[in-house]
Image (cartoon, rainbow, N blue to C red):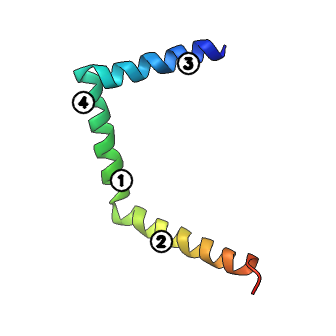
Amino acid sequence: MKATTALVLGAALGYFLGTEKGRATLDQAKGWATDTWNDPRVQEKVGEFQSKVSEAQEKVTPS
């Protein structure tokens, strides 16, 4: 089962990295991910999450 999974993942990776269409698909996905990450609404949520983590860390870390 592990060998089959590795084979399928290897074939997919080879396709995406080895063919022009595959690289174009990866570039498109990278663009979407970058656009999403740079969206102000996403960054607002990231800031909220970082604040909550900092608050939780202060409660857990002994003074």
Instruction: Estimate the spatial distance between the alpha carbons at disc 1 and disc 3, rounded to whole Å.
Output: 30 Å
Q: Please, is residue 4 above or below residue 23 in the view? A: above
Q: Which mark is residue 54?
A: none
The amino acid pointed to by label 4 is Ala
Q: Which residue is mark 1?
A: 36
Q: Which residue is mark 4?
A: 24
The amino acid pointed to by label 3 is Ala
| Mark 2 residue crowding within 10 angstroms, few (<14) / some (14–19) / many (20+) | few
| Mark 4 residue crowding within 10 angstroms, few (<14) / some (14–19) / many (20+) | few
The amino acid pointed to by label 2 is Gly
Q: Quadrant of residue 30?
A: top left
What residue occupies the far bottom of the structure in this picture? 63
| Mark 1 residue crowding within 10 angstroms, few (<14) / some (14–19) / many (20+) | few
Q: Are marks 2 and 3 in contact (CB under 8 Å)?
A: no
Instruction: Estimate the spatial distance between the alpha carbons at disc 1 and disc 2, rounded to whole Å.
Output: 15 Å
Instruction: Estimate the spatial distance between the alpha carbons at disc 4 and disc 3, rounded to whole Å.
Output: 23 Å
| Mark 3 residue crowding within 10 angstroms, few (<14) / some (14–19) / many (20+) | few
Residue at 66% over, 13% down: 1
Which secondary structure lies at badge 2?
A: helix
Q: Which mark is residue 47?
A: 2
Q: Which mark is residue 6?
A: 3
Percent coordinates x, y for residue 53 in the rendering = 61, 71
Which of the pair 21/63 is nearer the observer?
63
Q: Nearer the viewer, mark 1 or mark 3?
A: 3
